[in-house]
């Protein structure tokens, strides 16, 4: 679907990462892998360092920290926040949802609505669209969008194809309704027929935890996982990305009437360097306009990766000037969301790791 | 003019480092670096050089390097 919403402004962004540093080469060597082969993967895919949550820390904790810091730094009154939308695949509980828990932690008034969206790597764009609708058509003055996951906990340490990919982070995005401004454009889509290409098969209502033993199996490449682990069919995810993302990016740019020279940056979900460089090339963007070094510093941060890339790659510019930015998230669902946004000047909080719990 | 089998093979080898030590009749499973990353590199090469989207299953089903080259023709 296509959607155009106005008038809106992004008031600020904040990112809180996990505090624990993991090193792809050291972890692989400790797992008995060949250093030469590891270096080859590190170079091609762009895996170096990632930051994961400490024991006991959840996406709710990471997002709470980001939201507190953003609200303290933003010249928007917390009392004007009429809704909290929380995007996550790793909530604290099956019930209640993370948005309600964050609502309580931050002491929002009862007139502030709170709900979750269950999405991963495409989730920030979907969440932004949801928040923008609440402001443009729903009467909200400001909406706090939180997006984050702790996917590093969902993978099997003996699955060397999936486990080294993920970092943990929580983000806060504050959106406000304004009097005038450039419209925001969105293109959202899904391919539910291929939903099982990225999945955690067990642990939900269909196969509840404890209903049958979670048997660990090793695949032909020697990677082990059980039904409670996250599994991705890498080749199929790659094909899905190259098939859908360039088309969605082209569609949203047509909707906005933009061409590549008028766009300051193409901010793609930071899956990995290999995927981003392939997609940017197919979208007709030079590599310098498509940030792709985030994965080497943070890992794949799921729905937190686009806000993190905005802060880390464009933060100094976004805090002082207005930029036309195209962003696209893609992943579990399978789902994708592309958006053409006019952003800035805005509050950019420094990216910080969450202190470990004592 | 369509590229010959040998031209397609040399172009593929240049893009997929796991295939560097191989010949056309090499069994892919015998290559130490024939893994999920190598399969991704084959998919990218097929897409970029031939605008031909292949599936991971098609690539995994290949026994020898010659089977891979046949997918690209």
Image (cartoon, coloured by chain):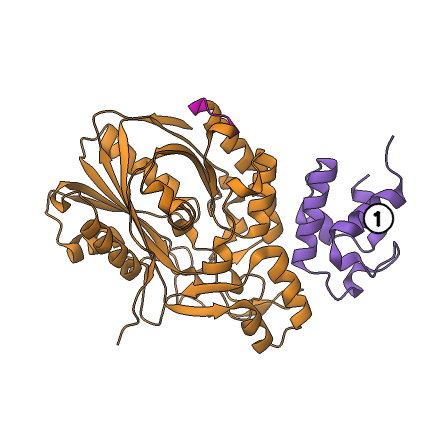
Chain colours: A orange, B purple
Q: Residue at x 84, y 48 (%)?
A: B10
For residue B64, side relative to residue A208 (left or right): right
Q: Residue at x 47, y 54 (%)?
A: A294
Q: Residue at x 37, y 46 (%)?
A: A315
**Where is residue B34, by image quadrant?**
bottom right
Q: Nearer the viewer, residue A204 or A281?
A: A281
Residue B62: say if magenta: no
Q: Quadrant of the C terminus of chain A?
A: bottom left
Point out residue A217 in the picture as x, y percentages from the top left corner.
Answer: 58, 68
Give, as a single range, the part of the protein colored magenta.
A255-260
For residue A204, side relative to residue A11 (left or right): right
Task: Give the residue at mark 1.
Answer: B10
Where A299 sits versus A242, above or below?
below
Where B56 sits versus A41, above or below?
above
Q: Quadrant of the N terminus of chain A?
A: top left
Point out residue A221 in the picture as x, y percentages from the top left corner.
Answer: 66, 65
Q: Nearer the viewer, residue A229 or B15?
A: B15
Residue A258: say if magenta: yes
State whether residue A228 appears in this view. Answer: no
Q: Residue at x 74, y 37 (%)?
A: B50
Dot 1, crowdedness within 10 Å: few (<14), some or many (≥20)?
A: some
Question: What chain does mark 1 sit on?
Answer: B
Point out residue A151 in the picture as x, y percentages from the top left corner.
Answer: 42, 60
Element type at mark 1: helix
């Amino acid at each position: 679907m296509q959607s155009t919403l106005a008038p809106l402004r992004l008031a600020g962004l904040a990112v809180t990462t996990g505090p624990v540093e993991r090193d792809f080469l050291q972890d692989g060597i400790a797992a008995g892998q060949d250093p030469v082969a590891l270096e080859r993967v590190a170079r091609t895919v762009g895996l170096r360092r990632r930051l994961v949550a400490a024991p006991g820390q959840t996406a709710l904790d990471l997002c709470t920290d980001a939201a507190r810091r953003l609200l303290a730094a933003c010249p928007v009154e917390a009392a004007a926040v009429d809704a909290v939308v929380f995007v996550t695949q790793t909530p604290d509980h099956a019930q209640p949802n993370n948005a309600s828990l964050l609502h309580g932690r931050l002491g929002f008034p009862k007139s502030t609505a709170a709900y979750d969206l269950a999405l991963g790597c495409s989730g920030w764009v979907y969440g932004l669209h949801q928040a923008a609708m609440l402001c443009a058509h729903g009467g909200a003055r400001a909406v706090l969008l939180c997006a984050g996951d702790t996917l590093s906990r969902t993978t099997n340490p003996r699955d060397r194809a999936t486990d080294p990919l993920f970092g943990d982070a929580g983000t806060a995005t504050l959106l406000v309704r304004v009097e005038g401004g450039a419209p925001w454009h969105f293109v959202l889509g899904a391919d539910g027929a291929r939903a099982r290409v990225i999945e955690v098969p067990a642990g939900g209502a269909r196969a509840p935890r404890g209903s049958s033993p979670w048997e660990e199996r090793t695949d032909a490449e020697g990677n082990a996982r059980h039904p409670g682990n996250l599994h991705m069919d890498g080749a199929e995810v790659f094909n899905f990305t190259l098939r859908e993302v360039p088309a969605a990016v082209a569609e949203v740019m047509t909707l906005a009437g933009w061409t590549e020279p008028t766009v300051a940056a193409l901010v793609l979900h930071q899956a990995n360097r290999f995927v981003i460089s392939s997609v940017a090339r197919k979208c007709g963007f030079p590599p310098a306009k498509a940030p792709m070094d985030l994965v080497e510093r943070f890992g794949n941060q799921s729905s937190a990766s686009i806000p993190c890339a905005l802060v880390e790659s464009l933060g100094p510019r976004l805090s002082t000037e207005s930029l036309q930015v195209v962003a696209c998230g893609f992943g579990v669902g399978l789902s994708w969301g592309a958006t053409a946004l006019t952003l800035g000047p805005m509050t950019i909080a420094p990216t910080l790791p969450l202190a470990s719990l004592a | 003019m369509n590229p010959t089998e040998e031209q397609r093979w040399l172009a593929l080898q240049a893009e997929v480092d796991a295939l560097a030590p191989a010949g056309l009749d090499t069994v892919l499973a015998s290559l130490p670096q024939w893994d999920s990353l190598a399969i991704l590199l084959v998919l990218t090469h097929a897409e970029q050089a031939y605008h031909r989207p292949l599936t991971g299953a098609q690539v995994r089903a290949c026994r020898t390097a010659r089977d891979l080259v046949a997918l690209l023709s």
